Image (spheres, rainbow, N blue to C red):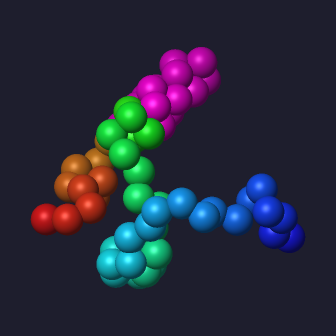
Amino acid sequence: MHTPNTIYTGPFLTEEWRGFQHHAQLDEAQVDAGIELTLDICRRHGIAPIFYYPSTTWRS
């Protein structure tokens, strides 16, 4: 169910990537915060933080 608080209305990209067409356009601070959150969750739950490259790269 969508509500006004769950519908993304920010900037987005419309390029094909991994079978999807629309992607939120994040700035560097948002990307850094997402990485820090992921690493914190990994530390707290004993999960090895593995990042796969170049699969995390938007454009080649």
- In percent of width and height, residue 5 lies at 77, 56
Q: Considering depth in this image, is 1 or 19 the residue closer to the camera?
A: 1
Q: Is residue 45 left or right of residue 49?
A: right
- In percent of width and height, residue 18 lies at 37, 74
Magenta run includes residue 48: yes
Q: Residue at x 43, y 80 (%)?
A: 21
Range shown magenta: 33-50
| Quarter holding residue 50 | top left
- In percent of width and height, residue 35 lies at 42, 34
Q: Quadrant of the N terminus?
A: bottom right
| Quarter holding residue 15 | bottom left
Magenta run includes residue 3: no
* Furthest residue toward left: 60
Q: Is residue 44 visible?
A: yes
Q: Considering depth in this image, is 14 or 39 the residue closer to the camera?
A: 14
Q: Is residue 46 visible?
A: no
| Quarter holding residue 41 | top right
Label total for image: 0
Q: Residue at x 54, y 60 (%)?
A: 10
Q: Quadrant of the C terminus?
A: bottom left
Residue 36, above or below 19: above
Q: Residue at x 27, y 61 (%)?
A: 58
Q: Is residue 1 left or right of residue 40?
A: right
Q: Magenta segment, principal secondary structure?
A: helix
